[in-house]
């Protein structure tokens, strides 16, 4: 059901994707494609909410990081069904943590260093509001009530590679 929900969202935007995409570590649930090439992986997890513990998200992060390294593309975990608030503040809380750092915000900040983020849908508005957060930034956001459907930070999609203390974001 969660995978069908995400697939329907992608289809409504005419985004190219493949399901059960083969990796060096098995199969990732979905792969977004750009010009037929892998662009971003999506690992479906049915149980992510505001109440999901950091230790559960850490397990998901570990799996997604393996996929990212194997495929050399960022991977997002989701769909996280969370409260995105009534304005842009909800999107901000998701990726920066606001006054209190939530487990999901920590995943987008720390997981981003391993090229892992989250795809989140609003619990109140389902497919009407969503975002993809990666590296402590909103990469993509959609809000049907405000007419927003955009890639916000294209650089957030770049892979991060670290060799000792040097980072390469290509």
Image: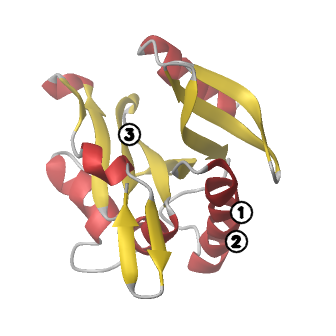
Residue 93 is left or right of residue 161, and the answer is left
Is disc 1 in contact with disc 2, using a CB cutoff of under 8 Å?
A: yes
Instruction: Tell me the residue that label 1 is attached to.
Output: 63
Instruction: Tell me the residue at 81%/50% (across/down).
Output: 24
- Viewer-proximal residue, 113 or 140? 113
Is disc 3 in contact with disc 1, using a CB cutoff of under 8 Å?
A: no
Residue 52 placement: quadrant: bottom right
Instruction: Tell me the residue that label 3 is attached to.
Output: 124
Instruction: Tell me the residue at 24%/30% (across/down).
Output: 150
Instruction: Tell me the residue that label 2 is attached to.
Output: 59
Residue 93 placement: quadrant: bottom left
Precedes in sequence: disc 3 or disc 2: 2
Q: CA distance from mark 3 to mark 1?
A: 29 Å
Q: Is residue 2 visible?
A: no
Q: Position of residue 50 (x, y in %)?
A: 47, 63
Precedes in sequence: disc 3 or disc 1: 1
In the depicted structure, whether residue 130 falls above or below residue 74: above
């Amino acid at each position: 059901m969660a995978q069908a929900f995400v697939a329907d969202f992608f289809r409504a935007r005419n985004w190219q994707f493949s399901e059960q995409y083969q990796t060096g570590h098995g199969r990732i649930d979905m792969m977004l494609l750009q010009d037929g090439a892998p662009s971003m992986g999506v690992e479906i997890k049915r149980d992510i909410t505001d109440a999901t513990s950091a230790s559960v998200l850490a397990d998901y992060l570990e799996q997604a990081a393996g996929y990212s390294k194997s495929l050399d593309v960022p991977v997002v975990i989701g769909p996280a069904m969370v409260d995105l608030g009534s304005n842009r503040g909800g999107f901000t809380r998701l990726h920066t943590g606001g006054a209190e750092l939530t487990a999901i915000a920590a995943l987008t900040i720390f997981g981003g260093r391993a090229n892992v983020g989250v795809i989140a849908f609003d619990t109140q508005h389902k497919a009407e509001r969503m975002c993809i957060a990666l590296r402590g930034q909103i990469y993509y956001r959609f809000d049907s009530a405000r007419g927003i459907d955009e890639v916000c930070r294209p650089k957030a999609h770049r892979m991060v590679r670290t060799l000792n203390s040097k980072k390469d974001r290509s």
